[in-house]
Amino acid sequence: MSMTSASTGNLKSLDWNMAWREARQNRKHARNDNTAWNRRAPSFAKHTKTSGYARNFLRLMNPEPNWSVLDIGCGPGTLAIPLSGLVRTVTAIDFSDVMISILDKRCWEQSVTNVATHVLGWEDDWRQAGIREHDVAIASRSLVVEDIEAAVIKLDRMAGQQVFITSLVGDGPCDRRIFDAIGRDLDRGPDYLFVYNILHQMGILADITFVANGDNTTSYANIDEAVKGLHWMIRDITDAEESRLKTYLEKHLVKSGKGWALSYKHTVRWAVLSWKKPSISRDVFPLGVTRTPWAGRPRDTWRPELRVESTNKTTVYSY
């Protein structure tokens, strides 16, 4: 069922995994292959050093010193490095060999000895690579797959105690004002709402809260550096678009310390979905199977209803 038909139909019968696939196929902002991330790795690593995301995520995660943690899509060590001083061991995997190289270098520079790294993607055989169950499994901003059901099953199998997923909220790190200025549409594809509903249909009792990147502001030496620094956001930028981007930046860059920064703050929020084991209903969705267990029968005959509880700090979704 498409999202269009779902708007007038029964959302309970919507196959959210298929809706995720369709939304990803229709998205206009797609840059998820390892070649693109290898190219972006150095600038991404520089940015994450000053981002408040890791600090905010770890405060929410509340890691325990005896934990073993599997960090899937670890990037340059955004979480793996700070986690290394808070838990027993960290296994960090990423499909970008440049990201892993940066992480290895950081571990060496900081004398971190309890982080094991592997160049692996979601589609690879982790067990063949020696990856075994950990206490906690994390997919932080890395659940960029076509079959999210299969990825969640794989992720859940690797966790003995708890699972954390961080997912996009709205446009995420992309600045819609910049896209409007250069005359290009922005569609980031499916965000955390899809992820939550997929977990819901799988019988996973996930809590949800939101963390921000913090108040960090990227500083540029000059306007040309700013233009280049924003190329990651705009796939295959044309000469005309780059000219319009430069005009936009000329209006919106202001002096900031020794460099230049945008005159406004672009707050980026992420949704953190988590569950403790065994909070998945094995009768509803046995993790030993790899295909949807509801095939051939109406899903609303087994799926529980959703209750939403609000607190003064956040909205917590539970069953």
Image: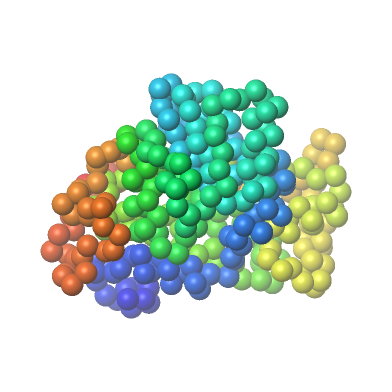
* In this view, 86 is above or below 42: above
The tally of labels here is 0
Give coordinates of residue 45: x percent, y percent.
68, 42
Q: Residue at x 57, y 52 (%)?
A: 95
Return the residue found at the far bottom: 5
* Colour convention: rainbow
Residue lying farthest left? 301
Residue 36 vs residue 258, the one in the foreground: 36
The front one of 39 and 14 is 39
Q: Quadrant of residue 158?
A: top left
User: In the image, residue 318 lies at what x, y percent?
Assistant: 26, 45
Can residue 313 be seen in this snapshot? no
Q: Nearer the viewer, residue 146 or 270?
A: 146
Horizontal side, residue 212 vs residue 65: left or right: right
Name the residue at 24% across, 65% down.
Answer: 12
Q: Quadrant of the N terminus?
A: bottom left
Residue 248 position, x and y percent, is 77, 61
Q: Is residue 64 left or right of residue 105?
A: left
Residue 93 visible from this viewpoint: yes
Give percent across and percent down for residue 234. Answer: 69, 63
Residue drawn at 57 percent across, 47 percent down:
119
Residue closest to the eye, 239 or 202? 202
Q: Residue at x 42, y 46 (%)?
A: 127
Q: Splitting the image into 4 quarters, where does residue 52 fall?
A: top right
Is the residue 300 above or below the residue 79 in the image? below
Q: Is residue 126 left or right of residue 182?
A: left
